[in-house]
Image (cartoon, rainbow, N blue to C red):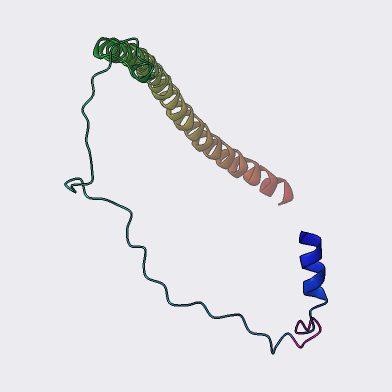
Amino acid sequence: MSSNSSSSSLSDPDHHPKEDPSKLQRPRLGSRKSSGTIIIPRDSPHVELKEEEYDDNDARTMSPRRSSEEIEKMGQEARQALIEQAKALQASLLEIVDRVEVVKSEHEKLEGGNKFLQSYIGELMQTSKITSAGAAKGKGKGKGRAIK
C-alpha cells in the first residue's frame, strides 16, 4: 500500500517537482509554548524521597564502594609509600650534596694548582726577558767591536 500512496503522490497533478527552488518556501511553524525546565525542586510535593535500607546481600549494595576500614588501610598504605619515597629522595639528595662537596674541594685544589702554575710561568717569562735582554746587549757590544 505504501508504494501505491507514493506513486499516487508522484502522479498528483498539484505536485510540481520541477518548480524553481527559490520560489519554494519552508512551511512556517506555528507558535509553541516553552516546555520550561525539567528540573523539579527538592521541596516540590511531587518529589518522593525514600530512605531505604538494604541488606548486605542485596545487589544494590554490591557497588565498588569501599568500607571505612578499607579506606583507612589504603590511606595508611599510601602514607607509608610516601614516607618511604621521601626517605629515598632524602638519601639521594644527601649523596648528591656529598658529591658536590667532593667536587668543590677538588675544584679548589685544581684552582690553587692553576694559580701556582700561572705565577710560575709568569716568573719564568720575566726571567727569560731579563736574560734575553742582557744577552742581546752583550752580543750587540761584541758585534760593534768587531765592526770598528
Image x and y of residue 45, in percent: 18, 47
Image x and y of residue 131, in percent: 55, 35
State which region is magenta.
Answer: 14-20
Q: Quadrant of the N terminus?
A: bottom right
Horizontal side of 137 relative to 82 (left or right) equals: right
Q: Nearer the viewer, residue 56 or 83?
A: 56
Quarter where residue 101 is shown: top left
Q: Residue at x 79, y 81 (%)?
A: 17
Q: Nearer the viewer, residue 100 or 18?
A: 18
Q: Nearer the viewer, residue 9 or 144?
A: 9
Q: Residue at x 43, y 77 (%)?
A: 31
Asked if the magenta segment contains residue 90, the reply would be: no
- Vertical arrangement, residue 7 with respect to residue 31, above or below: above
Q: Main secondary structure of the magenta part?
A: loop
- Vertical arrangement, residue 113 with respect to residue 40, above or below: above
Q: Tell me how many marks there are.
A: 0
